[in-house]
Amino acid sequence: MTQDATFEDGAARPLRLVAMDEDDLQVLSALCQDAVFPASEMQWQRGRARFGILLNRFRWEDVPIAQRGGRTPERVQSVLAVENVERVASQGVPRGDADTILSVLSVTFEPGEAGGAVILTLAGDGAIRLQVSELEVALRDVTRPYAAVSGKVPDHPA
């Protein structure tokens, strides 16, 4: 007999997920919501057709466990990598400014004739548009979790 996974099964393990379609991307988007990063932590490797960001991601998957155990909510550094990137455009995003902190609201996909676009919507009316030949987005935790500085779960608009 098989048994469904529980939240506890994934509690202490780093996430390593890949989105190859829009349904998968919705999961990554939810996990990236409220992630913060300095503008200087974005990089487009044109020759490798890859765009990456080093994020400080809120660990949404750990919230039920932390609340039950009376622990402080956690964040973890993660790499969000988008493959097959042909072009990058942004609006309201200062490039290379280490002092500017950006916050991810969502990661979505707009299909097009030759692939489509991955859109990273940022707080404060910023956006990053990544023209891709094919959808492939990966999220990988690269550090151990640490206590969220605020000690709180971020608020969500209804």
Image (cartoon, rainbow, N blue to C red):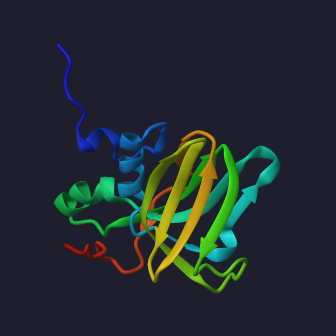
Residue at the spot 46% in from the left edge and 51% down from the top edge: 109
Is 41 left, or right, of 57 in this rendering?
Answer: right
Task: Give the camera-side residue of 9 and 131.
Answer: 131
Q: Position of residue 105 (x, y in %)?
A: 41, 69
Residue at the spot 46% in from the left edge and 83% down from the top edge: 124
Q: Position of residue 69 (x, y in %)?
A: 21, 59
Is 65 left, or right, of 46 in this rendering?
Answer: left
Tell which residue pokes out farthest to the right in this image: 47
Residue at the spot 40% in from the left edge and 55% down from the top edge: 29
Residue 80 visible in image: yes
Task: Give the camera-side residue of 98 and 1.
Answer: 98
Tell which residue pokes out farthest to the front in this image: 113
Which of the 4 image quadrants contains residue 99? bottom right
Total marks placed: 0
Q: Position of residue 113 (x, y in %)?
A: 56, 42
Q: Image height check: is 43 above or below 138? A: below
Q: Position of residue 142 (x, y in %)?
A: 57, 52
Q: Image height check: is 136 above or below 50? A: above
